[in-house]
Amino acid sequence: MENINPDLTGTTAFTGTRVLGRSGIEVSALGFGCWAVGGEWQTPDGQPCGWGKVDDEESVRAIHRALDLGITFFDTADVYGCGHSERLLGRALAGRRDEVVVATKWGNRFDERTRTADGQDATPEFARRALTASLARLGTDRIDLYQLHISDAEPEAAAELRDACEEFVREGLIRAYAWSTDDPDRAALFARGRHCTAVQHALNVLQDAPAMLALCEEAEQASVNRSPLAMGLLTGKHAGGAPLEAGDIRSRPPVWLPGFRAGAGADPRWLERVEAVRSVLSSDGRTLAQGALAWLWARSPRTVPIPGFRSVAQAEDNAGALAKGPLTAAQLAEVDQLLGR
């Protein structure tokens, strides 16, 4: 839930921190997602899975800047850059590990040398091997939030993995766990575990998820928001519809990635929806991206958006949303009206 303090009028004020579900783990209300800083990687058939080329030194500077601006929650996955994102995050957090909450994910097989991801493994044995490897890459003795990265894992297998995570908690290797899935029924299965405290799922102004938010409220789970800026559409940088570089996953979007067209950039229909809400989101001196994050905080007291970043400038823009806080209830309702919801 949001960590709130009463103001002089008796209402509540946004303090910029939230608690991850029932875990008691406090984080900044804004996390930073480390998919993009993992650099380029691909599937065996050449499908790009990253966001294009990156400058590791700039990525480290951006993480340091985020820390200085009050960001205490960083989300990555072992498969991002096929290990590179975890290694880079571990390097950037060296000497400051105790200041932050680190989340990572497991379930995908990959080759670090070739930066190729190939298949998934939903067995408890693989989970333990993956956890050991992630701890080494991150340079830490524990992971704060360990997340299953197979969104459609079979319930029977997921129940075994939930039990494995409980064992990891008992061993002190992780503090809590979650499932990265857009299926509320699957999320509910994991939430039966004592130390399950969050669901990572897609949520942004253009893609609401009322059923998942209802589950998070009912099961006392944090809503960790993947794609909070709609893969960049809510930054305003893709209005021209220009094609993206070949190593960017959005240049050849898989079926689960809406809003972009193969070799043709952003989908004009999605851009029209962005334009419909631009004035509301950019009111009160916010940038478009800051307004999109403000919408998420207003949508539920359990949300923790995790926008990606590749530069100090992006880190500063995203972190700047904290100072402005959530949209008002009236602005939230206006967005729904403009989008026909």
Image: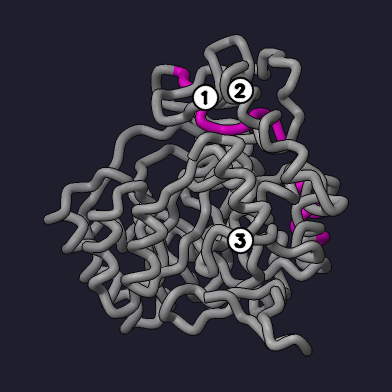
Q: Residue at x 57, y 19 (%)?
A: 269
Looking at the image, can residue 88 be seen? Answer: no
Highlighted magenta segment, given as a residue range? 46-65
Q: Nearer the viewer, residue 81 or 331?
A: 331
The residue indicated by pointer 2 is 247
Q: Which mark is residue 123?
A: none
Residue 145's spot in the image, x, y percent?
46, 68
Taking the magenta stretch, the answer to whether it contains residue 236 is no
Q: Mark 2 touching mark 1, by CB under 8 A? A: yes
Number of callouts: 3
In screen coordinates, is 21 left or right of 169? right
Q: Of 192 and 59, which appears nearest the observer?
A: 192
Q: Is residue 285 above or below residue 176?
A: above
Q: Please identify, in this view, whether the residue under mark 3 or under mark 2 is nearer the observer.
A: 3
Image spot of residue 60 (x, y percent) = 76, 53
Q: Position of residue 57 (x, y in %)?
A: 80, 47
Assign a secondary structure to mark 3: helix
Tag nearer the camera, 1 or 3: 3
Instruction: Pick whichever of labels 3 and 2 is earlier in the sequence.
Output: 2
Q: Amino acid at mark 3?
A: Ala
Identify the residue shown where x is 61% and y is 61%. Answer: 297
Q: Residue furthest top?
A: 263
Tag shown at residue 48: 1
| Sequence-first tag of 1 and 3 | 1
Image point 70% across, 29% down: which residue? 275
Label 3 packing within 10 angstroms: few (<14), some (14-19), many (20+) = some
Instruction: Find the distance from the CA under tag 2 to the CA under tag 1.
Output: 6 Å
Can residue 3 be seen by looking at this rendering?
A: yes
Which badge, 2 or 1, comes first in the chain's sequence? 1
Q: Nearer the viewer, residue 221 or 268?
A: 268
Residue at which label 3 appears: 298
| Three-letter amino acid code of the residue under disc 2 | Gly
